[in-house]
Structure formats: structure tokens, C-alpha cells
Image: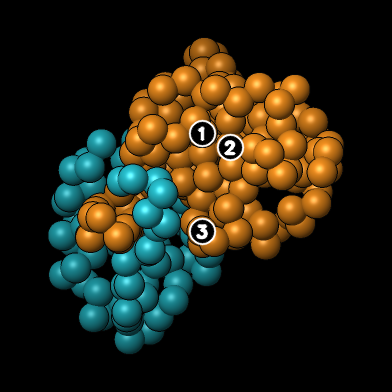
Chain colours: A orange, B cyan
Amino acid sequence: MSPVYRRELYSLQGSGPILDMQAGMPIELRSQLRKQQKIIPDSIKIVAQVDTGASTTCIKAGLPAKLGLAPVGVQMIHTASTPNVLCDKYLIMFMIPSVNVCFEIAAIEMQLKNQPIDCLIARDVLCRYQARTLLGHWSP
Amino acid sequence: MPGQLDKEIAYYASIKDKLLSGHQYEFALIRGDELVEVYKTEIDAITAGHRRYGNTPFLAIHIDPMEKPLFINNWLCV
């Protein structure tokens, strides 16, 4: 499902802490491709939601394949409806152009069924950047 | 795509007890059935893997005696 949020509709009270971001290949892999004179995959525009209740950042299934990334780890996850699902992890570079923030994080690939977001920004990011920094451009 | 790291996961299971004795809560970098090295942080392990193996599958895993599944909110409808 394509993201349905639009910037002009964003408000912290209305739509929640939604961010326009870009996801791309991590710096080390970009550097290797550059040295090999190969094409670096374009970054992809995504919509993310900040969730203080989540410990690890998650990305929508299929996004790593679009970026051409191979898995670098696994994480067993557990939900109320589905226990013990083994998901792959990928190192992804995220950019938030509106606040000029860029970081790399190992994110879990999982189904985000029927959700109008591509990414869930969790406490592993928030411990590096205060929510106010990430959401600096927001209206209440 | 689950399954790309099956070999690495199986190898980690076979050496986990040994790793726990000296490297608890660190991060192991495993490729195939080889333990490459142990690192203090996940990012260090992954970056070292990328330097060594490029954009190919490898396993950077937390050496954790508990290995509790991560709970994800139900609204994600996994």
C-alpha cells in the first residue's frame, strides 16, 4: 500500500509523529561501489512514524530488495497475533532532509500490513537523537 | 527473505556456549561456518562485514544468553 499521508495534513495531534525520510545504501557499501565504478542505487523516499514503544527500528518488507541490500543479521520477533517470527536485519542509511539528520541503523524487515508507513523509528534511533530534533519542523 | 542466513544461524548455535564464556553481550560476525571476529557494537560488526564481504549476506549477532524475542505492537498486524 502506498503511503497516504501528505505533508500538508501532518500534525502531531492529527496524524501522529510522521516523518518524510529517505532510505539508502550505507556509506561503506556506497564507497565500495564508487571505487568499483558501479552504479549506486538511488535513495528511496519513505514515510516513517516515530514510536517510543518500539525498541528496534523496523522497515517494510521489500524495501531492502529495492535498495539492493543483503541481510546482515536476524531478529526473532513476537506479536500478540504471531509468536516467534524470524526476520532479517539490514543496515540502512536514513536521511531526514527537513532537519538535516542522517544516520545508519540496523533495521528489521517485516510486514507492515495495511499501515500507511514504510518505517517505524524506534528507541534505537531516539537514544541518538531527541524526538524534538527529528520532529523539529512540526506543528502541534 | 528469511533463509539466506540459515547456515550462519546454525553455526552460531553450535558455538554459542563457547562465545558466551568470553564474549557475552558482544557481537559476533559470522560468514558461512566461520567465526570472523567479535565486536563491541552491532554497527562495528556489520561495517566490518561490509568491508570484508561487500554487499553479500553475513550474520552479525548479539551474543546474548537470554535471546528473548522482540515484542512488536499488535497494530503492525504481522
Chain ID for label 2?
A: A
Chain ID for label 3?
A: A
Q: Residues within 10 Å of mark 1 (few under 14, many from 20)?
A: many
Q: Residue furthest front?
A: A14
Instruction: Tell me residue A34's x, y (percent).
Output: 58, 21
Front one among A103 and A45: A45
From mark 1 to mark 2, how far is it between C-alphas? 6 Å
Query: Image quadrant of residue A70?
Result: top left
From mark 2 to mark 3, how far is it between C-alphas? 13 Å
Q: Which residue is mark 1?
A: A117
Q: Residues within 10 Å of mark 2 (few under 14, many from 20)?
A: many
Q: Is residue A25 left or right of residue A128?
A: left
Say whether disc 2 or disc 3 marks the residue closer to the N-terminus: 2
Front one among A19 and B63: A19
From mark 1 to mark 3, how far is it between C-alphas? 15 Å
Q: Secondary structure at mark 1?
A: loop
Q: Is residue B17 left or right of residue A140?
A: left
Instruction: Tell me residue A91's x, y (percent).
Output: 49, 43
The residue sitting at 33% across, 45% down in the picture is B77
Task: Say what amino acid the circle numbered 1 marks.
Answer: Ile
Front one among B1 and B9: B1
- Look at the image and tell me whether residue A87 can be seen: yes
Which quadrant of the figure contains the N terminus of chain B?
Answer: top left
Q: Which residue is mark 2?
A: A48
Asked if badge 1 and badge 2 are on a common chain, one would say yes
Q: Which residue is mark 3?
A: A54
Say whether disc 1 or disc 3 marks the residue closer to the N-terminus: 3
Instruction: Tell me residue A125's x, y (percent).
Output: 63, 54
The residue sitting at 43% across, 42% down in the picture is A90
Q: Relative to residue A119, is residue B7 depicted above or below?
A: below
The residue sitting at 76% across, 29% down in the picture is A97
